[in-house]
Amino acid sequence: MNKFSVILVCAGTASRMEGIDKQLFLLNGKPVFLHSVDKFNQIDFVQDIIIVAGTHNIDDIKKYCSQYKFDKPIKFTLGGSTRQQSVLNGITLCDESSNFIAIHDGARPLVSISDITNVFNNAVKYNSSTLGVPVKDTIKQISYDNFIDFTPPRELLYQIQTPQVFNKKLYLKGIDFAKENGKDFTDDCQLIEAIGHKVYVTKGSYSNIKITTPDDIGIANSILKNKGEN
């Protein structure tokens, strides 16, 4: 049986949130990050959930978690100076029996259990998978002097989301490559791409938004309201 450890990345400084800590903002009465914890807690083959937090919010995150009952072990660690290092800090706490890791943005509170299950299943099938949705607009590649260089075919373009799920040994192989070559990737799929492996894209949902600016809070509330959760 395949087992999964979830790494929830909550260590960002939220520089575009005008002083609001997006992880702790109450969305439908519950902190943003806890919405994701609750979803992963309902997945049978998840062994544990590791929350990677910052020095600015780890105490509050621990406090909120203590107020809820979860079936899965919830673990905590501080993030590093980059996302790559933060994820690696989380991996050190993963249950030893887990052979897959799922990395999720704490600021994506609206991911559905069905999408999580689908991307987990595809990760087992292909050794790596990520959620994503087709882009809705035409994308242009431009030059440094702001002229259009190229129009990639829209049907081949996806907006990548999380969770991104990987065979743990494969991911660690990617980490070793990054260290040996002085690379610091901002997207976890890049680690797998860098060592020559393909990542399968599981079609997700447009509602799986990432809260990045204050405007996104209103969008998230609207989505919850439309789902009857607000």
Image (cartoon, helix red, strand yellow):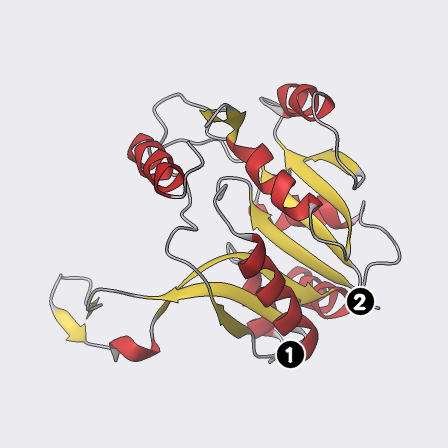
Which residue corresponds to mark 1?
Answer: 126
What residue sits right under mark 2 in the picture? 2
Residue 205 place in picture, x, y as percent:
42, 59
Question: Viewed as shown, does residue 55 lie left or right of 76?
Answer: left
Residue located at (25% from left, 64% from top): 136
Residue closest to the eye, 186 or 216: 216
Q: How many C-alpha atoms fall within 10 Å of the one at disc 2: few (<14), some, or many (≥20)?
A: few
Residue 114, by quadrant, is bottom right
Q: Is residue 122 visible?
A: yes
Question: Residue 73, located in which quarter of the rendered image?
Answer: top right
* Front-lying residue, 6 or 40: 40
Q: Residue reaching furthest front?
A: 228
Q: Which label sits in the foreground, 2 or 1?
A: 2
Q: Earlier in the sequence, mark 2 or mark 1?
A: 2
Amino acid type, callout 2:
Asn
User: Residue 86 location, x and y as percent?
Assistant: 64, 44
Marker count (numbered): 2
Pointer 2 and pointer 1: residues touching (CB < 8 Å)?
no
- In the displayed structure, would residue 47 be above or below residue 21? below
**Above/below status of 52 relative to 138:** above
Q: Secondary structure at mark 2?
A: loop
User: In the picture, which quadrant includes the C terminus?
Assistant: top left
Which residue shows up at 42% across the image and 45% down it? 210
Q: CA distance from mark 2 to mark 1?
A: 13 Å
Q: Amino acid at mark 1?
A: Tyr
154 is higher (above) or lower (below) than 143: below
- Provide the secondary structure element on which disc 1 rests: helix
